[in-house]
Amino acid sequence: MANRNFRKPVKRVRPPLNNVVTSKRNRHGAALSQRARGLKKSEQFPFAPPEDWHEVEDVQGRSFEVIVQSPGKGYRHVVTPQEIRDRLSVLPDHMLEPLAVVQLSRMTRKKLSLPCYGMQWGNALYLYPIEHSLTEYYAKPPKPAQITEARMFGGRWRQSGPTEWELVWTEAAVKDFYLNNILIHELGHLLDNRNRSYTDRERYAEWFAIEHGYKQSDRPKHVSKKSATKRVTRRHHS
């Protein structure tokens, strides 16, 4: 996206406990990566990981801000602020009007038990770092849909032990995954002012990510368009 004017950081507040956070769920429906083996979550209740919250009274006429936090030891951000701006710049202006902040968040000890790729809260989108090696670790084999999704964006699953699986990314593949999937998916949540249930909101965000992310990108497609329309369960908090 064309560089937008810098502005003062928006007010950071802690959200009320009864608010609902929408973010990328763990691929297995529970936290099974190395970040939090065995932790289970429920899609029936609101869930909010520890985070810096941003509240903007009026976003009309304002450009969004990109905030970068240190990723944390052993982790790395896989996209840059300019890559985020460039990716969002190809979308219609009206899709960016509600967006106030995109934050590249830090990985903390508390967040190790709450693994996710991205999250949407209010007018802000959060992108989380992954392992510095670009290899993620799981305690369960991937489902067919998860293998398909990784292939769509260039990720590769492999079994490393009797009960151990790894999801391996290249530099180009993980950038593709974040810019054309995670970022666009969370923007879909921000723009969804109609659906209220978790299932309906996820269905809309998945559609939005395919239509405005995967299909609109210039990279080679690893699977057919028919396969790309299949719903995939992603790492995502309810």
Image (cartoon, grey):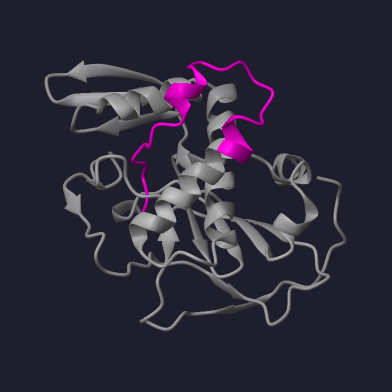
Residue at coordinates 48% horizontally, 17% vertically from top-left?
A: 223
Quadrant the N terminus occupies: top right
Image coordinates for residue 19, horizontal then vertical, percent: 41, 77
Q: Is residue 122 magenta?
A: no
**Does 23 sit above or below residue 207?**
below
Horizontal relation, residue 175 to residue 139: left or right: right
Residue at coordinates 20% horizontally, 44% vertically from top-left?
A: 37
Image coordinates for residue 178, horizontal then vertical, percent: 55, 38
Tell me where residue 230 sits by quadrant: top left
Q: Which residues are magenta?
A: 211-238
**Does 114 sit above or below residue 138?**
below
From the viewer's side, name the closer residue of 14 and 194. 194
Tell me where residue 90 sits by quadrant: top right
**Does 139 sit above or below residue 72?**
above
Quadrant the C terminus occupies: bottom left
Image coordinates for residue 66, horizontal then vertical, percent: 70, 56
Residue at coordinates 24% horizontally, 24% vertically from top-left?
A: 165
Magenta: main secondary structure: loop
